[in-house]
Amino acid sequence: MHLGINSFFKSFFLSFNKFYSSIKYIVGFRPSNLKLYRIALIHKSASIISEDGSLINNERLEFLGDAIFDAIIAEYLYNQFSDKNEGFLTKLRSNIVNGEHESYLSEKIGLNKLIISNISNSKYSKHLYEDVFEAFIGAVFLDKGYETTKNFILNKIIKQHIDIKKLASTDTNYKSKLVEWSQKDKKPIFFDTALDKSRINSDEALFVSHIKIEDKIFGEGFGSSKKEAEQNAAKKTLQNIGV
């Protein structure tokens, strides 16, 4: 059930001072536009209706934050690893900018405690945390601009919660690894990824991905996003082909 915007803010959000303090603690600076941060915490399952009848949730901020986070991580890795090639940088960025890792970061900085959602099944919490993390980055960007967002990510995210050296030595991009194998062995692979039709009208929709090698299915994977489903399918395929 969707609530009017006025009753929503009165009923569901912390007092102004407490919410302000919570955001300030997370970002490390004084937020200017609290409304942006509030919207960043609203999952689409708990959308509210604005005065003009449109739905308010974090999906637009999620879209923006995804791009900003990706750009800042790319710039950071480019500067940190001046002797590494594009392939290495791409893999390392993928190890940082992915759903599972963003979900972890969301919990580490405390966003999971502030989320507004009508989803009760913990099975989907990882995807929920991922979305909120990206939306929060979008809110920081709109509130303070690129440089402040970059400083927030460098000082509050990377330095405190990301072990770059460990990630640099870990290959968890199963899809990329499978593609490299197919190119080396000259065996074409095909990703068949789609929304699970049984959940097409659900906010908790799952994607399913099948991987074919020479017209034979070698792996199946599920996920709350296409990316996650394909990674899981690629991981299963690598296991089945012994790579």
Image (cartoon, helix red, strand yellow):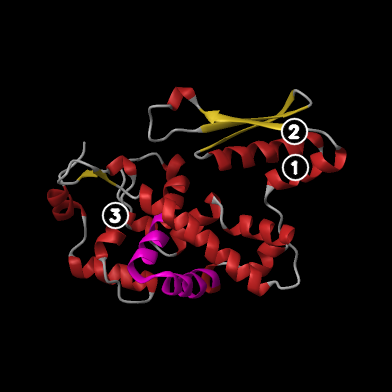
Q: Secondary structure at mark 2?
A: strand
Task: Please tell me whether the stretch drawn in magenta is mainly helix, strand or loop.
Answer: helix
- Between 138 and 199, the residue placed more toward the observer is 138
> Measuring 23% from the left and 42% from the top, which residue is drawn there?
54
Q: According to the image, label 1 marks what residue?
A: 179
Q: Quadrant of the C terminus?
A: top right
Q: Circle 3 sits in a helix, a strand or a loop, which is it?
A: helix
Tag shown at residue 39:
3
Q: Residues within 10 Å of mark 1 (few under 14, many from 20)?
A: some
Residue 166, image quadrant:
bottom right
Q: Amino acid at mark 1?
A: Val
Please give the range of residues in magenta: 135-158
Q: Is residue 243 visible?
A: no
**Do the residues under discs 1 and 3 have CB atoms within 8 angstroms?**
no
Compared to 28, does 70 lie above or below? above
Residue 61 relative to residue 54: left or right = right
Which amino acid is tagged 3? Answer: Ile
Tell me the quadrant of the picture where the N terminus can be found. top left
